[in-house]
Amino acid sequence: MRRLILTLVLVGWWGYVGAQGPTTPKIICAYPASGAALPSGCHAAQMVQLGMTSSKITYALAGRLRTLNPIVALDRASLEVSRAIHAGLLEGTVESPEPAVAERFALSADRTSVTFALRQGVRFSDGVALSAEDVRFTFERLIYPAEITTPWRDGLRCADGALPTVTALSPSEIRFSCKTPMGRWQLWQIGSVPILPKHKLQRYERDPKGFNSAWALTTPPSQIAGLGPFRLEALEGEKLSFARNPHYWKRDIRGTALPYVKELTVLTSLPESATQLFRNRQIHFFY
């Protein structure tokens, strides 16, 4: 339902600006035909990764932002914002997972382990290179400790209830192992976890409970780094300003660096406020 509403809003906006004359070029996810439903899995961050080059997109997100920490986030607004900043090993769907930060992955013959090969040259938004140690650290130090309140932990469990053993085989290879075969959902959960930078969060190895309040809304943007298409530039009240991540690894089929959009502004607000902003043409879309 949310996807359908967003599609109708976007179609309405494009039709309106087309009638009014030149304005910001339309941004669509995976190039659907005009008026068609967005492909399964599209979300706000992807909306600005594909389409025509544009300088800025502004949209409203209904809900109150509570944290910038993607591991402890539970509310919709925080989760949506995290998708603009962070990325995991896989993308796609549960039924059809595709490589993302990982260039490829392979299940063992008995399905008790999965090995990911990290994409070469991937860097966090602050320019520091990604390594398998960042992946191991994210799981073992930021999700596994019982002192950390996170929705991710239980979805990662093996069939026997244990958490997967994480082994960094090399700087670019990481393996997750269980004593029981892995199902599709567990594989998807492992691949969906946002990989965070060890160099920014290493102090929480000694203070796992403290990680629950890490990357709060008062955190300076310079202290936050991710693997997603954007980096946070400023947070002022209900307004979040993002700039294109210059180190983002994705390219389009022409080899052009993504995302095309240079600046992204997200306004968190009540639904009725978002509607009024849209009617006043102060935002491109809302949901």
Image (cartoon, rainbow, N blue to C red):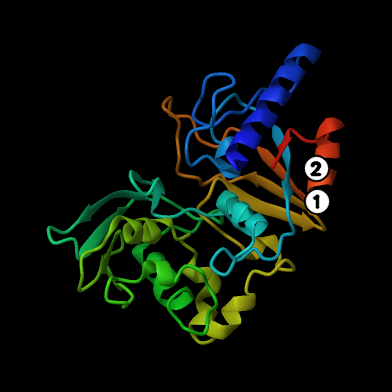
For badge 2, the amino acid type reads Ala
Name which quarter of the figure residue 167 lies in.
bottom left
Task: Look at the numbered discs 1 and 2 and tell me whether their residues touch, using CB distance below 8 Å.
Answer: yes
Q: For mark 2, what is the residue? A: 274
Q: Is residue 224 above or below residue 33?
A: below
List x then y, in percent, for residue 86: 53, 55
Q: For mark 1, what is the residue? A: 270
For the view shown, which residue lies furthest in the left direction?
109
Q: Is residue 104 visible?
A: yes
Q: Quadrant of the N terminus?
A: top right
For badge 1, the amino acid type reads Leu
| Category of crowding for the residue at label 1, using alpha-carbon neighbours closer than 10 angstroms: few (below 14), some (14–19), many (at least 20) | few
Q: Is residue 261 visible?
A: no
The residue at the point 24 percent across, 71 percent down is: 178
- Using residue 213 as the reference point, say whether residue 283 is left or right of it: right
List x then y, in percent, for residue 237: 82, 58
* Front-most of residues 75 and 219: 75
The residue at the point 53 percent across, 50 percent down is: 228
For the view shown, which residue lies furthest in the bottom direction?
206
